[in-house]
Amino acid sequence: MTPEIFALCVSAALLELDTTYAFQLTLSRGIIAGPLLSLWTGDLMAGIQVGVFTELLFSDVNPLGGILPPSAVVCSAVTLALHAMGIELYFAFFFGVVGAILFALAEKFMRKNRFKWLIFWERRVMQQPGQINHAILSALANAFLSTFLLIFLFTWLCGKGLVWLVPHIPVQAHFACRFAYMAVPWIGLATLVPAFRLKTR
């Protein structure tokens, strides 16, 4: 794994903090995260394409009622990292989607287990108000580190597996994956049209 891909994983973990933990400047949206992360790989057009496709694909998932949507940052990061390793974009994207879904499940599990840790810090801050900055920084560092490890390990495992697997994939599978990849924006638009119709009524 090259230093650029390592830096991409670090940047993705930082951008993921923007979703709920810090800032919330919408930097974690796929349309923004994709081009930003692609600066590490040097393929801006791939970053824009992945960002737009990710945005459209996940546009119908609303984070309401305890629903944790797939991470657009993780999807973009895994896709661009695998593409930088030499994997075709239409293969890499689907592994990015799988990574985003798995990350959402892992994040949900971590949030449940983080509850006891938050109670501990709440009691400590109540006793020592000066500890609040330390508590916030500790929470951010913990979220960053766990996100980085998940992105890095998933990307590394997929990269190792795909480098070995891709040469053995038949041409028909390449064609099918390329066709499915190009259908992604249309699937996203198909989910948006009914939503806009409902809002205009």
Image (tube, rainbow, N blue to C red):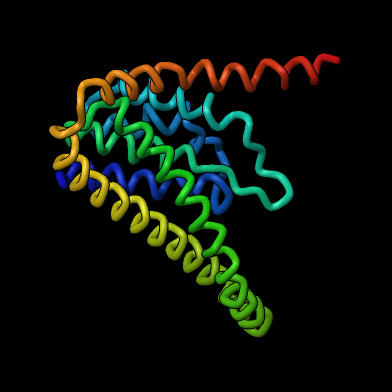
* Nearer to me, 125 or 5: 5
Q: Residue furthest bottom?
A: 127
The residue nearer to you, when weighing 143 against 108, is 108
Q: Is residue 59 above or below residue 109?
A: above
Left-right relation of 130 to 50: right
User: Does 93 appear above or below 188?
Assistant: below
Q: Residue at x 24, y 50 (%)?
A: 156
Q: What count of labels does the image hold? A: 0
Q: How far across and how far down the image is residue 193, in percent?
A: 67, 15
Q: Is residue 201 left or right of residue 29?
A: right
Q: Position of residue 182 (x, y in %)?
A: 40, 16
Which quadrant is the C terminus positioned in? top right
Above-or-below relation of 21 to 98: below
Q: Is residue 156 left or right of residue 79?
A: left
Q: Identify the residue at the far right of this view.
A: 201
State the image quarter where residue 98 is shown: top left
The residue positioned 49% from the left and 36% from the top of the image is 27
| Left or right: residue 122 compared with residue 91 | right
Q: Residue at x 29, y 42 (%)?
A: 8
At a point 37% along the width and 17% down the height, the residue shown is: 179
Residue 186 in the image: x percent, y percent?
52, 15
109 to 153, vertically: above or below:
below
Q: Quadrant of residue 97?
A: top left
Which quadrant of the view contains residue 136? bottom right
Residue 76, image x, y percentages: 39, 35
